Image (tube, rainbow, N blue to C red):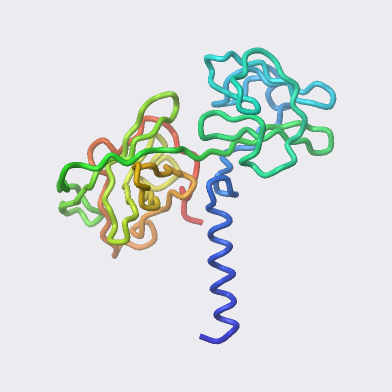
């Protein structure tokens, strides 16, 4: 390749890494302006949130799960706008980061998320037959399950192991097919020695058959349809 091509490839790789980082732009699932929620109830975020002069004041019970500065939040706290990187936001909710921001005097909360998980390998590979996009059924070899917590519940995704050690899951969720494609692929780096991995739905991607009918893609195996919405990652064709 020419020097110009080399430089472009390097730029493209850096750009891809940046936008798909655990708390990069693809991790943003919503920006909620408090003025739009006079009752203080932001969708899918526990507690009541209100602007109060130069701060945002959430009122949250410990049972709801958020932490502030690493400590459980129970009651009220005043939060100024976060100024650092997303991962250092003061409010966390499991793998999510709730970033307080202000624009021209209007306060809001941004919701970023990334979910830690663990890979539980099967004793030996299990092959099941699943429908494919071309209407035929084919074998899909599964190496184990990615176990994680989301929406207050323990969840699992059956996953195959790629030749390079990465994990690959085919999944659907409650909004699949509702304005988006019917299922998606989710890859993850190889788990570490303790089986730890990241279930980063910000990196969920449309399968090749979303772009052309000539591709053969497996549908999600039984158990890989999640009963909640995953509003992250690639969802629709542009």
Residue drawn at x 29%, y 65% as measured from the top left: 214
Image-based side of 114 in relation to 80, left or right: left
Q: Quadrant of residue 75?
A: top right
Residue 209 figure quarter = bottom left
Foreground: 171 or 23? Answer: 23
Q: Is residue 169 left or right of residue 138?
A: right
**Residue under the point 33% across and 40% down:** 146
117 vs 56, nearest the viewer: 117
- Tag count: 0
Query: Going by the picture, which residue comes out furthest to the front?
Result: 193
Instruction: Look at the picture and state if 87 lies above or below 218.
Output: above
Residue 14, percent from left and from top: 57, 64
Residue 118 drawn above or below residue 3: above
Compared to residue 201, the image places residue 210 above or below, namely below
Percent across and percent down for residue 230 are 45, 38
Farthest residue toward the bottom? Answer: 2
Please give the name of the residue rendered at 53% of the width and 38% of the height, measured from the top-left corner: 113
Residue 47 in the figure: left or right of residue 238: right
Residue at horizontal 40%, vertical 38%?
117
**Percent x, y for residue 30?**
60, 37
């Amino acid at each position: 390749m020419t020097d110009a091509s080399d430089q472009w490839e390097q730029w493209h790789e850096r750009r891809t890494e940046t936008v798909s980082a655990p708390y990069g732009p693809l991790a943003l699932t919503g920006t909620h302006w408090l003025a739009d929620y006079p009752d203080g109830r932001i969708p899918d975020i526990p507690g009541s949130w209100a602007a109060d002069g130069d701060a945002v004041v959430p009122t949250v019970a410990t049972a709801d799960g958020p932490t502030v500065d690493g400590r459980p939040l129970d009651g009220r706290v005043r939060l100024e706008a976060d100024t650092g990187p997303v991962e250092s936001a003061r409010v966390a909710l499991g793998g999510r980061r709730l970033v307080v921001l202000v624009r021209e005097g209007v306060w809001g909360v941004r919701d970023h998320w990334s979910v830690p998980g663990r890979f539980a390998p099967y004793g030996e590979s299990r092959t099941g037959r699943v429908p494919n996009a071309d209407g035929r059924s084919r074998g899909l070899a599964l190496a184990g399950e990615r176990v994680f917590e989301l929406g207050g519940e323990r969840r699992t995704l059956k996953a195959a192991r790629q030749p390079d050690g990465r994990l690959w899951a085919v999944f659907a969720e409650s909004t699949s097919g509702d304005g988006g494609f019917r299922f998606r692929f989710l890859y993850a780096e190889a788990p570490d020695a303790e089986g730890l991995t990241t279930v980063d739905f910000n990196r969920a991607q449309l399968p090749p058959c979303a772009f052309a009918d000539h591709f053969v893609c497996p549908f999600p195996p039984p158990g890989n349809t999640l009963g909640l919405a995953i509003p992250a990652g690639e969802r629709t064709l542009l």
